[in-house]
Amino acid sequence: MEQRQRIGDIEVDLMMGKNHQSALLVLVDRATLITTLEKLEGKNADVIEQKITRRIERIGASFFKSITFDNDKAFANHHRIRDKFNLPTFFTRPYTSQDKGTVENRIGLIRAFLPKGTDLNQYSVEQIQSIELKINNRPVRKFDYLSPLQKLKQKLGVAFMN
């Protein structure tokens, strides 16, 4: 998994807003850096489970190979996602953000649009989707300046040619 060749190994984390009163659910594919953002009103495990479930269903469960969660009670319903989609789930070691370095890096990029201390409740779903689109179309040096979306298309093209 460390080679990051396989599409569908996902890292998940929360990006908290001002005073921890709002949050974004951030999912990142390790191989392509495709990043999805879901606006949350809080850290309720049931709501987070529903958001992740809807995202998996929208994209297609066959895309997902594994999910790595942060050790946060917000992800307490991970087993329901695992069981519903027959999807391996993993957790980072406590206090080791490097175990999910990809999503941490992408949250750093999101912070360019939504700095720490930002009240995320002031942003509409459409504004969050616009930020998601910008991030997924932004060239990445490690991909020879292809964007995550271009990298995904490239990887999918190779997969269909083999």
Image: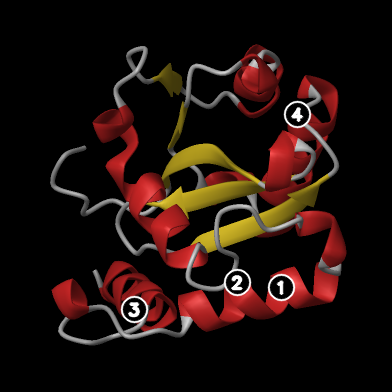
Q: CA distance from mark 1 to mark 3?
A: 25 Å
Using the rendered image of the protein, determine whether residue 13 is visible from the camera's viewpoint: yes
**For mark 1, what is the residue?**
129
Tell me residue 82's x, y (percent).
Answer: 60, 21
The three-letter code of the residue at mark 2 reads: Glu
Q: Residues within 10 Å of mark 3 (few under 14, many from 20)?
A: few
**Tags 1 and 4 in contact by the CB under 8 Å rule?**
no
Residue 98: which quarter of the image?
A: top left
Q: Which numbered disc flags the more N-terminal residue, 1 or 4?
A: 4
Tell which circle, 2 or 4, labels the residue nearer the N-terminal end.
Answer: 4
Image x and y of residue 38, in percent: 72, 53
Q: What crowding class fits label 2: few (fewer than 14 Cα within 10 Å), some (14-19), or many (20 or more)?
A: some
* Quadrant the N terminus occupies: top left
Tell me the crowding category of disc 4: few under 14, some 14 to 19, or many 20 or more residues within 10 angstroms, Cα based: many
Pair 2/4: label in front: 4
Image height of 18 relative to 129, above or below: above
Give the spatial CA distance, label 2 vs label 4. Answer: 20 Å
Q: CA distance from mark 3 to mark 2?
A: 23 Å
> Which residue in the structure is indicated by mark 2?
132
Q: Residue at x 70, y 47 (%)?
A: 18
Q: Give the left or right position of residue 93, taking residue 4 as reference.
A: right
Q: CA distance from mark 4 to mark 3?
A: 37 Å
**Badge 3 is on which residue?**
157
Q: Quadrant of the C terminus?
A: bottom left
Which mark is in front, 1 or 3?
1
**Mark 1 belongs to which amino acid?**
Gln
Q: Dot 1: few (<14), some (14–19), or many (≥20) neighbours within 10 Å? A: some
Give the residue displayed 30% in from the left and 57% down from the top. Answer: 31
Residue carrying label 4: 43
Identify which residue, 20 or 23, lies in the foreground: 20
